[in-house]
Image: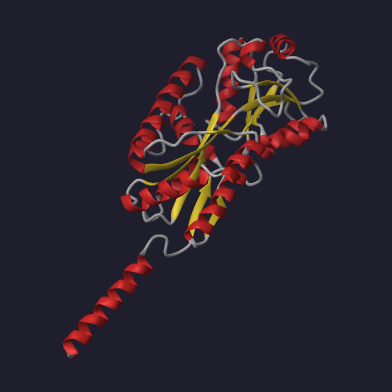
Amino acid sequence: MLGRSLLAGLLLLTGALAARAEYPDKPVKIIVPVAAGGGVDVMARLLAQYLGERLRQQFVVENRPGAAGVIGSKAVIASPADGTTLLYTPSSLSLSVAINSTPPYDLAKDFTPIVNVAISPYALVVNPSVPAQTLKEFIAYAKANPGKLSYGSGGPGSPHHLYAELFASMTGTTMTHVPYKGTLPALNDVIAGHIQLMFSDVPPLLGLASTGKVRPIGVSTKARVAAFPDVPPLNEAGVPGFDVAGWFTVAAPAKTPQPVIARLHAEMKAIMATADMKAQIAKLSLLPMDTPPVPEMQSFVKSEIVRWGEIVKKAGIAGSQ
């Protein structure tokens, strides 16, 4: 009788421990490798909120900007591979590796992608003091003043940097790169007139453009952006073939257990399919992005590295940071 009671007690204890160990059994940190306040940050916090509600656990967003996402990415790699530290990244996984001759990490070995979140069109904006109302006028002005225009970026290898270098390469213009730790510090200096232009994701520009603090003169995608219906794509307005955009994805350290990846993949994909999240994506002037099975996501990231590696070479961007 005592033996049966002991066995029953052990079974109950085992069940309780198993229940307690079910993921996530403690708070989860989502590291965002850019400065707080932009569209990337907003989307990460929304995702953290919905995950917390669905999984009944705390999901905390932590911003670690710098080095085009490398600082935040390395912090995730150095964290335990148990699903308690995730990376929310805006294309920097592929761009940083593409521009760096000695990559700080191996995407195929160091990360496992979980979900694709959204696509981010960019806009080329200038300080109102720049004497150009259209893209063609701006290109002509830049050619007439080689090296006198400065553009900002979120750091070497960031989308803002590579898009501007691709633009310069395709238009035959010469501009000076001024790197910052994040989009907003760079954008603030465009507003102040300390630098003249930058490629920026759209959400931070919405109020600034409507009040005349910056002037958008082209968008990076071939399709027009709903927030700026009168601003033409660069592809149409003077730079044929220009078509780039950022993308957001969530990843975990590579050795994170498959059941944890599978659960996060299913939960996040379900969140991205909700009407609320779709509305938030549209509100932030982003575009939805399909989430295929994890192996296909890994292939996508690899293809982006190859694509931008080719663009880096063609544009003559330095191969190291």
Query: Residue shown at 52%/43% (left/top)?
Result: 272
Is residue 257 among the parts visible in the rendering?
A: no
Give the quarter of the image for residue 104: top left
Q: Position of residue 87 (x, y in %)?
A: 47, 46
Q: Nearer the viewer, residue 88 or 272?
A: 272
Instruction: State left or right for residue 46 relative to residue 109.
Output: right
Query: Residue shown at 60%/28% (left/top)?
Result: 121
Q: Position of residue 29 (x, y in %)?
A: 49, 55
Is residue 169 among the parts visible in the rendering?
A: yes
Q: Position of residue 18 (x, y in %)?
A: 32, 68
In the image, residue 27 above or below residue 289: below
In the image, residue 270 above or below residue 301: below
Instruction: State left or right for residue 10 relative to residue 33.
Output: left
In the image, residue 280 above or below residue 27: above
Question: Please, which colouring scheme is shown?
Answer: secondary structure
Query: Residue shown at 61%/13% (left/top)?
Result: 235
Q: Nearer the viewer, residue 127 or 46?
A: 46
Q: Quadrant of the image for the N terminus?
A: bottom left
Instruction: State left or right for residue 129 relative to residue 24.
Output: right
